Amino acid sequence: MIISARPYPNFGKIPSKTRYFNLDEMTFYPLGRIALLSGLTALGLKKGDSIIMPAFICQSFIQPLQSFGFNLVFIDIGKSLELPVTVITNIVEKDDSIKAILVVHYFGLTQNIDEIANVCQKYKIKIVEDASHSFMSQLFRDRGSIKSDIEIFSMRKSLPVLDGGALRINTENYRLKKSFNSRYASILNDINYLIMRFFERLIVAVGVNIYGQFVNRIKVKLRGKLSHEFQEYSTNPHHASWQLKKYLRSEEYLQNTKYKITNNFNQLSQTLQDLGFRLFLKSIKDNIIPQACIVFDDRGGMVDYLRLNGIGAWQWPGEEMPQEVAQNYRQYPNTFLFDEKLVLIPIHQSMSNKKINYITHILSKWIES
């Protein structure tokens, strides 16, 4: 059995009578990283300004910021993936070039940013919430609890779409480009994406392990070409693709997605705890829709083992750890710990009970080996 790391498109009819998600309050981009750069410049940040951000981040996400000319100040995360407020305070008191702080909501979880928001308000610093991993949780979150200046999304990590970078600005004083680039959001791109994912389902159905070494080398090359193409895009907003709008306007689809993911998490996490695995998150609160079931790999080699058996598990950021961080283990011990030990196991909305049972079976064999 092959288990994809990401959900498959809904090839049936998607009900969209209810305008569940307000598209008007969003500005769309092909990628979340482009939305981030656009949002920061809209808030008035300029080349040479400094931004505090967690060291637990991937290089591709911050590359546009570095290319633009921002100075990135990395700090290590805490044991709960949080940004330590005391460290932030010490930095901003000594460095008046700090103009913004990036708070990342990892793996579908959401961070409490009240204390950070207080520091930002005191020192007149912008606060940015990166919900690239956590669109679903942010969607069901109480809007009144959001205290950031801007939020960044990457909906393609939660929904079966090609695009999905988005920006939501929560402050009144901003300047955003109004000219739109429609190059990316075309019906042709939608069709190509659907064909690609349909073909993926076909080869999976006949037993081809898309996480094997040969297929993986092909995917790495394709991602490199696609990443290079994205670098050519400006920060002009894009129109959301037809598929993305269909999903966002369907309350039924989004509610069903929430139910399926949380049910898959509860089933898998309880079983893995019974087997003796150490989980980063044992249970979830209301309106938290995790991106994965997160397991500590205390032995090493779990991701390779799972992928060899057709399960699209992954580690993050892995090979994409920023070079400035990768060269300073002692300065960022928690970042290295989570990068090396956390294994993310898929629980997305396309998963069935049969697939959850298969993951359990493979991991029970891992214990026995």
Image: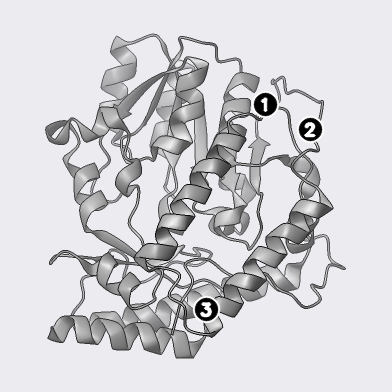
Give the number of the disc on residue 136: none
Position of 3 with respect to 22 (left or right) is left
Quick one: label 3, few (<14), some, or many (20+) residues within 10 Å? some
x 16%, y 82%: residue = 367
Quick one: label 1, few (<14), some, or many (20+) residues within 10 Å? few
The residue where tag 1 is placed is 234
Amino acid type indicated by mark 1: Ser
Amino acid type indicated by mark 3: Val
Question: Tag 3, which secondary structure?
Answer: helix
**Considering only vertical position in the picture, is 321 above or below 161?**
above
Q: Nearer the viewer, residue 323 or 131?
A: 323
Label 1 near label 2: C-beta < 8 Å? yes
The residue where tag 3 is placed is 204
Give the number of the disc on residue 181: 2
Q: Earlier in the sequence, mark 2 or mark 1?
A: 2
Question: Tag 2, which secondary structure?
Answer: loop
Q: Position of residue 351 (x, y in %)?
A: 52, 79
x 60%, y 79%: residue = 202
**Considering only vertical position in the picture, is 185 above or below 243?**
above
**Considering only vertical position in the picture, is 7 above or below 103?**
below
Residue 209 seen in the figure: yes
Amino acid type indicated by mark 2: Asn
Q: Quadrant of the C terminus?
A: bottom left
Q: CA distance from mark 3 to mark 2?
A: 35 Å
Question: Tag 1, which secondary structure?
Answer: loop
